[in-house]
Structure formats: C-alpha cells, structure tokens
C-alpha cells in the first residue's frame, strides 16, 4: 500500500517538473526571439549609419586650414551659470571648465577630406571613440554627427557684436555673430558664432529661457556655454594688426612720442591734422619730454598727462595693465587693438636687487601663438634706433621679464568723444578744476565730502595724476569753470587750461590758456560754446581786490588782522594813559 502511494507521488512530481521545464523553454524561446529582433535592429542601425556616413550629404564644401592631425579638441559641454536678465556676459567657472576638459578631451586621429568627416580618440583613456564631426551642418547632424565648422559667408547678414566671456575669472572680449535660433518658452534662444577667435575657434553660447533664480527667485537666464574647439594645432597661429605703421623716434628720448603717434595715426585724431613728436610734447606741456626724456620719479604723473592728452586728441581710450598676459595680447590683437608696452632696457643693482634705470616704450602689433609650447612670440614695432626703428619678433617669456613692474602696458580701444572737454594740466603740485552750469550743478572734487561730484547729467570727471579731464554733454553750452589752488603746496603753480568742443567726431573749436596761480587763489572763467560760429568764448571773472590773496592768504583776512592789530594797539595805549594818570 505504502509503495503504491510513493509511486503515485513520484509520478506527480515528475509531471509537475516536466510542465515547469516546458514553461521555461517557452520563456527562453520568446526571449531568444526578442534578442534576435534586437540584434537585427542593431545590425540595421549600423548599416543605415554607414550608409548615411557615406552619403553625399556630408561632402565638405570647404575644409578649414586648422583641420589636420594634431588638432587638440577641448569639448566643454553644458557649463551652466545664472546671470541677471539683460546681461550678455557669460561666466565659465574654473572648476566647471576643468571638469568639462577632464570628461571631454579628444585628439584628432583620422581625417577624411572627401567626406568632410574626422574622428577623435579620447585622451584620458586613449580609447578610440567613433565620434564624428562635420565641417558644415547637415539636416540629421545630431546624434549621428555634430557640426564643428560654420562658413562665415552664411553669417554675413547677422549682426556682429562684442561679447565678454569670463574664462578662469578673467574677462575676454570676442567679436561674435548673433543669430536668433528661435523662440522658446518664456524667451528667445540665440547662438553666438565666434569664428575669428584664436583660443576659442568656435564657441556657441545659448541664452535660453527666462526663469526665476532657484536661490533668489529673481528673473534670470540660464546660460549654456559649449566650448567646441581649442585651436591648439601643431601649426603656429600668426596675427598682426593691419594699419599700424612703424615710426622711428627722432631723439634718444622720444620713444614715447613715436609710439604714441603710431597709435594716434592708427585710430585717427579729431582734428585730422598730423602731429610731429615735438608737437605732441608741447601738447603735454613740456618740450623737455621730447629732448631729455622723463625722470623715473615723474613716470606716473607723466602717464596720466600722456593718457589725458591722447584721449583729448585721438579717437581712443586706454586701460592700464600691471600684469599683461599673452591671452590679453591675443584678445586685443584679434580685436585690432595695438598695445603700448613699457619695458626696462637698463637696470642697476646686484643679484635680485635690480632697479630700473632706463625705460623704453614699444608697440605690440601682433603675436605668434604656438599652442602646447612655451615658444609664443609677440611682434613688436620698436621706434629705436632714432631715424630708423625696427620691427622684431620676441619670445613672449623673454619680453614678459622686461615689462616695467608698475605699469606693464597701456591697452588701447576705439572711442569717439562728443561734447566739450576741459583739460587742466599742472606739472607741479595739486590744483583742482571745477565746473558749474547755469543751474549751479557741480562737476569736480568736493573737498568737504571727499568725493567726486558729477551733478550735470551725462558729465564725466577723470583725474589722471597731474591731468584733470571734465567732459560735458553737447547741450551744455554756457558754464563757469574754476581753477582752484586752495590745496597747492608751492607758493605759485603753473597750469594750462585747454577747452575743446567735439561734434560728430570732429574738433570744431578750441581754447588754450597757460598761466600762473598763487597758493590759495581761485581763477574763475565764464565759458560760452558757440557751435554755429565754431568758437569758444572764455572770459576771466575779475575778482575784487579784497577777495584776492597774498602768499596764499586772502587779502580780506590780512586787512581784518591788520585792523584788529591796530585797534588792539590803540586800545592798549589808551589803557596805559589812563593808568598813568
């Protein structure tokens, strides 16, 4: 009986196991069918991809010169930063840039000129990636391929603007074509094509939808910066500003004047009148700068007067730089902006104690970028020797060591002033310039508040170490100006007052006055700008004799003290007589 029961149980277990095995076999067959379908799909995808890659759609119409073996690609993807609405400046934070370069670094390993396709290898892992890029865009460019080159002729109708990109914390200005990509939710999306840059050959900056900042709640833009290509090619990149002419210095000490005229002639002057080197020294108020040079302790006041004079004469502006870098040289030269550089040609001292004895001024007009090496070079217009001048190519590291510590160079940029410009030059100790319009609004330095006041709308006050510039808008045609020697140190001070009127980039009228002012004295002038008559009328306001000063002391105060002294003497005599009686 027990044996029969056991046999029946065994049969049932066998039947159950057979049914489960059959279910598993059915499941495996279904999975195998799906895998076969997936394999077929993969094979079909690969076949279609290969067919697309070999199609004439990717035929390159033009191949960039830099596209060759050895090109270094730095592919920064999705670097996000919030900025207030209305700002176009984009910031690439150092840590984000580093992370992007670590993840996306490729080395060009294959170029197909016929198809316009090139392939890269991942640098950190040295693994070969089938990443394809194309010279030009194609309708199916992503994800099969990514356009890396955009012909500039397709951008001819797009506006060319300047965009500041912050890389490693330093701002660099690039010229870019702004192309509207189309409306997006709550905003408009734009693409900026930077095709003329050097370190960033093609940089796409997308300003996307306006949305609230997650931290402050204020409206802001999401900015995605995609840095596509660093042109670190094996071939050197050479660029030079066109239009700057080499001008030799006329004396052993007029390098500054020759370099200045190279810059002035390049940007143009308001008077369209060519200047000579000695005339430029006269504009600065001291011909000795032309014949005898500048003493070292005068360098900072001289540079202030120099900048103020060049801004008054030429259509340009300046930025002093105390730590000039090769990246800044590249940026300025790419924008067509030559740089005046101060170099130390002779030093005195021993070991590390070196004192600059002789300074020299040259103009940087170009560069030769040798990526991946320390062999970068700058192209120099040197006004030395007198009567000849030289164009030279100097290794950047060598040139950098010679730069003057206090001021490496003066970076230039175009600027056209409009309005009336008052210039006060004072070669000795401090005197001040003030302007008051008909409503009594003041432009100048307020001694009591220890601050600069620019109460006239659209006016500007600049103090450039020995030179003061006040710029008034065109609608201010009648005003008072005051030369104030209240805080002068010497008993008397020499000064020069120059008033110029500039309209539509042209000098229409000018007034000059050189005089001596005593310590504590004020000189007030009424000024009338007559644009139709191309004239500036200036009249000295006569001060009553009791309001003048003697050796820096107001006359009325001297008279008051004398009267008090006389009354005191008379009073003392009267008291003595009464006591004697």
Image: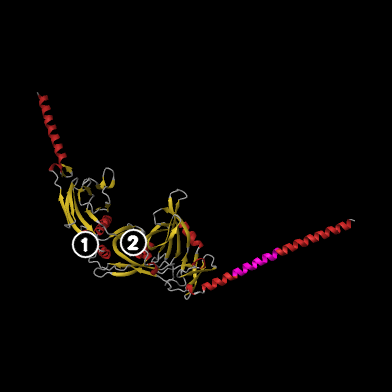
Q: In this view, does 269 lie above or below 555?
A: below
Report whether 539 appears left or right of 308: left
- 256 and 90: which is toward the camera: 90
Question: Of residues 372 and 67, which is closer to you in this image?
Answer: 67
The percent position of residue 222, horizontal first and vertical second, equals 45, 55
Assign a secondary structure to mark 2.
Answer: loop
Of residue 575 and residue 8, the one placed in the foreground of this image is 8
Q: Is residue 566 magenta?
A: no
Mark 1 → mark 2, Cα distance in angstroms: 33 Å
The label nearer to you, 1 versus 2, is 1
Question: Where's the C terminus, which quadrant?
Answer: top left
In screen coordinates, is 208 left or right of 248? right
Residue under label 1: 271
Is 283 rendered above or below residue 574? below
Measured from the top left, where is residue 217 in percent x and y? 45, 48
Q: Which colour scheme is used?
A: secondary structure
Image coordinates of residue 478 in percent, x first then y, are: 19, 50
Identify the magenta region. 27-42
**Res 411 → quadrant:** bottom left
Tell me which label, 1 or 2, sits earlier in the chain: 1
Q: x, y (%) of residue 375?
A: 40, 68
Along the line of sight, which residue is nearer the eye, 18 or 474?
A: 18
Marker disc for residue 403? 2
């Amino acid at each position: 009986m027990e044996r029969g029961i056991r046999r029946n149980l065994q049969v049932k277990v066998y039947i159950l196991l057979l049914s489960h095995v059959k279910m598993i076999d059915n499941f495996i067959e279904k999975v195998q069918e799906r895998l076969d379908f997936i394999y077929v799909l993969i094979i079909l995808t690969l076949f279609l991809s290969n067919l697309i890659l070999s199609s004439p759609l990717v035929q390159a119409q033009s191949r960039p010169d830099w596209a060759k073996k050895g090109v270094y690609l730095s592919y920064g993807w999705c670097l996000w930063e919030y900025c207030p609405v209305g700002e176009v400046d984009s910031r690439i934070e150092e840590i984000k840039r580093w992370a992007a370069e670590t993840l996306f670094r490729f080395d060009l390993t294959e170029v197909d000129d016929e198809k316009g396709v090139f392939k890269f290898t991942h640098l950190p892992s040295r693994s070969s990636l089938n990443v394809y890029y194309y010279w030009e865009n194609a309708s199916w460019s992503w994800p099969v391929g990514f356009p890396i080159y955009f012909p500039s002729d397709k951008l001819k109708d797009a506006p060319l603007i300047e965009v500041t990109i912050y890389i490693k914390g330093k701002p660099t200005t690039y010229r870019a074509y702004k192309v509207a990509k189309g409306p997006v939710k709550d905003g408009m999306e734009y693409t900026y094509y930077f095709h003329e840059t050097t370190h960033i050959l093609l940089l796409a900056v997308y300003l996307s939808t306006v949305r609230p900042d997650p931290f402050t709640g204020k409206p802001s833009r999401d900015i995605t910066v995609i840095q596509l290509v660093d042109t670190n090619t094996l071939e050197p990149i050479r660029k030079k500003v066109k239009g700057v002419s080499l001008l030799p210095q006329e004396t052993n000490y007029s390098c500054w004047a020759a370099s200045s005229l190279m810059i002035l002639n390049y940007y143009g002057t308001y008077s369209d009148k060519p200047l000579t080197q000695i005339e430029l020294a006269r504009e600065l108020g001291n011909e000795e700068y032309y014949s005898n040079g500048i003493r070292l302790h005068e360098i900072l006041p001289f540079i202030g007067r120099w900048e103020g004079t060049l801004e008054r004469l030429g259509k340009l502006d300046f930025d002093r730089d105390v730590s000039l870098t090769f990246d800044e040289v590249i940026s300025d030269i790419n924008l067509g902006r030559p740089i005046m550089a101060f170099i130390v040609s002779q030093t005195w001292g021993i070991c590390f104690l070196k004192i600059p004895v002789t300074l020299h001024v040259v103009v940087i007009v170009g560069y030769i970028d040798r990526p991946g090496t320390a062999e970068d070079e700058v192209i120099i217009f040197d006004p030395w020797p007198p009567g000849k001048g030289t164009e030279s190519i100097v290794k950047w590291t060598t040139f950098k060591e010679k730069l003057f510590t206090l001021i490496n160079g003066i970076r230039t940029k175009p600027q056209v002033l409009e309005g009336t410009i008052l210039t006060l030059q004072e070669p000795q100790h401090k005197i001040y310039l003030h302007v008051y319009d008909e409503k009594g609004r003041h432009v100048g330095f307020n001694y009591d508040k220890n601050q600069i006041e620019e109460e006239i709308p659209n006016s500007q006050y600049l103090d450039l170490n020995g030179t003061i510039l006040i710029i008034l808008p065109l609608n201010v045609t009648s005003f008072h100006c005051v030369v104030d020697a209240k805080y002068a140190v010497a008993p008397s001070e020499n000064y020069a007052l120059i008033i110029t009127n500039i309209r539509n980039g042209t000098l229409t009228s000018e007034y000059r006055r050189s005089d001596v002012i005593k310590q504590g004295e004020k000189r007030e002038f009424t000024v009338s700008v007559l644009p139709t008559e191309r004239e500036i009328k200036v009249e000295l306001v006569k001060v009553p004799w009791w309001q003048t000063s003697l050796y820096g002391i107001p006359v009325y105060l001297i008279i008051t003290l004398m009267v008090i002294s006389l009354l005191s003497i008379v009073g003392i005599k009267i008291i003595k007589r009464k006591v004697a009686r």
